[in-house]
Amino acid sequence: MEDARRVWTWAWLEHLTQDLKYALRNLRKSPGFTAVAVASLALGIGANTAIFSFVDAALLKPLPYPHPERIVSVWEKNPFGFSNTISTLNFLDWNRQNRCFQYLSAIAWDTMTLTGSDRPLELNVQRVSVSYFKVLGVGAELGRTFASDEDQVGKDQEVVLSNGIWQSRFGGDAKVIGREIMLDAKSYTVIGVLPAGVFDRTSAVMWLPLAFSPADMTRNYHWLSAIARLQDGVALDRAGAEMDAIGARIAALYPDSNKGWGVTVDPYIDQVVQPQLRRSLWVLLAAVGAVLLIGCANLANLTLARGTHREHEIAIRAALGARRLRLIRQLLTESILLGMLGGVAGLALGDALMRGIKLWLPPDMLPPQANVRMDCDVLLFTMVIGILTGILFGLAPALSGTRPDLVEMLKEGGQTTGGLTRHRIRTALVVAEVALSFVLLAGASLLIQSFNRLASIDPGVDTASVLAVDLPMSTTEFTNSTTLTNYLTEIAENVRSVPGVRDAAITDRPPMEGYANGAPFLIEGRTYEPYSQRSLCGFKVVGPSYFHTVGIRLLKGRGLEESDLADAPRVAVINETMAKTYFKGEDPIGKRILIRQLMLGQSARGPEIPWQVVGVVKDEKVGGQVFSLDKDIPVIYVTFYQSPGTRNSLVVRGDMNPLILSRSIEQAIWKVNKNQAVANVETLEEIKSKAVASARFRTVLLAIFAGIAVLLAAVGIYGVVSYSVSQRVYEMAIRVALGASPGDLLKLVIGKATLMVMVGLALGAVAALALTRVLASLLYDTSPTDPVTWVAAGALLAAVALLACYFPARRVTKVDPLTILRHE
């Protein structure tokens, strides 16, 4: 038995070796066909490899932490059912009462200024609970992470560095451990350096202990996020139920701040990979998959046409005793070999495309945990898809080409028309190409329409010639409101004096970038609502000249003025949305809005104070992420004199391109304080472009893939019609001899091709009806079944397809029946 198995194995290997040699010899005999096939496959496989590398890194690979399935994100759930940031006291209660988490860590984002070198540097940092790195299961590569008592006020002067900042700012010096560095004018001790990798791809470059001061101890101010590691054996549902019960107990004890609020526990991966990114990547992978299928259909048609000229060879081999299975295996070996060659070439092309896409990818579109590279998974995917592609485009020709009519073929000396079966296969392949092309073209057209509408949204400000500059400040430097407001006033005045500057104003956030502080409010004189149940408005702190500087139009009343100082009556300007939503049918001027005061240097809000409405302005877009541009939220504006804070930016309108003025603006700021960091210098045009960068990225990519699909479909149609015309020359000659005009012949050929295209469009429309609904959440102000877009896509594809038909069909008008019939 063992000897028989050994003999069979050697025989199989011998046959495989013969098939490979024969396949290589045939491919060398047809260098043109081989080059076209490999190039086509390389294009399709390369695109799939590139996109798969992103899908694999972002969606398929587990998070780069030990037992990542046990890491969860924990949020408060507001009365409207949405996840919300967390208040300090609620978090501390969670930490004491829960039994489902092994570790629970709070996180607060911050910016700090690193000084001690020639130029102050703004850094993104995270303040975290001492258990943060235990939640993630990560230790320091150098030094240590936080000890258990280092989240106490007075013991929180330590910092852990990312590997990237250690290398770039401290030269990779191991002696950095124990060194004192100055952050926001305070001394911190470096205690550790994290491993290279995931922490180098996050925007934070340093981690500090999160110590809660007495002023932070509140339930009314929600500012923290949290992650946790589940205890061994605790399921997500059980943790969610336990935390929800804890939230209910807290709400019962503190109804004014917590009534209607709960807790939600989600897999951490859902926070890392947002649904929109997940859907975008799958859509792009499906698109390149469709492009590859269209390429396979083209190659199948090309192989079928080539097989016609090999029928005599196949017939001879069959007549000499070759079994059909052996012939099929031989032909499939040839196509699989082509697929593997295309896979090798596609791997090189895919690597280049991946690198190009990474350079063009909008910042922060991918999560920091996604390390996109050509690894073993991507290599395996490329090889598998190369083999499958070879089988896919080679199977139909192999099956149809190994059913020879030996007598007819040998009698005709190899001249054959290929048969009805092959014609039907070619037709079906072209129909499939048109259908797939329509799906891609319709999807791309919808995204283009959506992007154009998104990009044309009026931001509510005049973006021309306006520069935005972040001015990170520390509460340790500015503990006094008067000192801070005087400092900001001096900076604004210095910048206004720069030649070429028309105006400058302080704002807590530039237009279209970041959300205004969410402030629960109550309109004086209306029914009392508990603090936890109140509606939210954006609370934006600006300088008196802000509206003039950025071009926001005053609709009613007056704007903010230089006389609205700290000791003057508290006044506010509201936006149009707030006026229409909460003062419908009445004049808001003179009304008073109750909002708890923002306290300088404190996370807790102060006492509730009334702000008297003195004006109404046009809406500006305050959101900074894709699709927030379309939302108009209610906003209240107050002067920084009356509500100062350390989160400040400067907007500057110039008489010229403001980027030209940026150096002079920096110098003007440094005249006030040489240690003031100046960060994120951008024009409002750049901010607006950045806000729609992700939408632009996926739209352009899908449009490129759709364009390639349409071109491939056109090539396929051209090839099929051209081959059909060449095979029907004798028939056409007879028709001409019987009186048919050139126009009749043209109509005959184009008519049949048009039928193929129309069937393909119909099938494509049915498929698109189901598939384009996947795009619904990626579209702005555009229906996934928008009839105008669909008709335009169909018309464009039909026009290209018919143009591809016309040129080969035109040859039938030049048929000379006498010459052809005499030759036959």
Image (cartoon, helix red, strand yellow):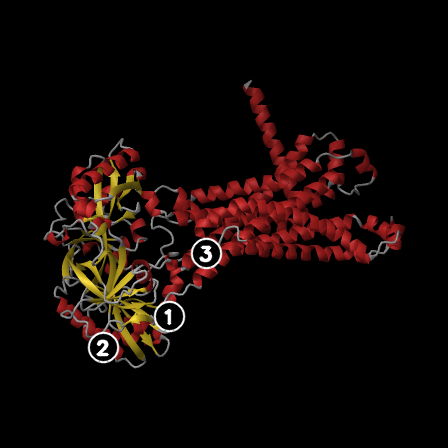
Callout 1 touching callout 2 (CB < 8 Å) = no
Residue 3 visible somewhere in the drawing: yes
Residue 433 visible somewhere in the drawing: no
Residue that sits furthest to the front in the current view? 585
Q: Residue at x 14, y 65 (%)?
A: 478
Q: Residue 4, how many percent across, how many down?
A: 58, 20
Give the foreground label among 2 and 3. Answer: 3
Q: Which disc, if any, is residue 781?
A: 3
What type is the residue that disc 1 sits on?
Answer: Thr
Label 2 sits on a secondary structure element that is: helix
Q: Earlier in the sequence, mark 1 or mark 3?
A: 1
What type is the residue that disc 2 sits on?
Answer: Glu
**Considering the image in quadrants, where does the N terminus appear?**
top right
647 or 426: nearer the viewer: 647
Q: Which disc, if any, is residue 141?
A: none
Q: Residue 182, how many percent across, how many down?
A: 16, 61
Q: Which disc, if any, is residue 493?
A: 2
Q: Write down the quadrant of residue 566 in the picture.
A: bottom left
464 or 723: nearer the viewer: 464
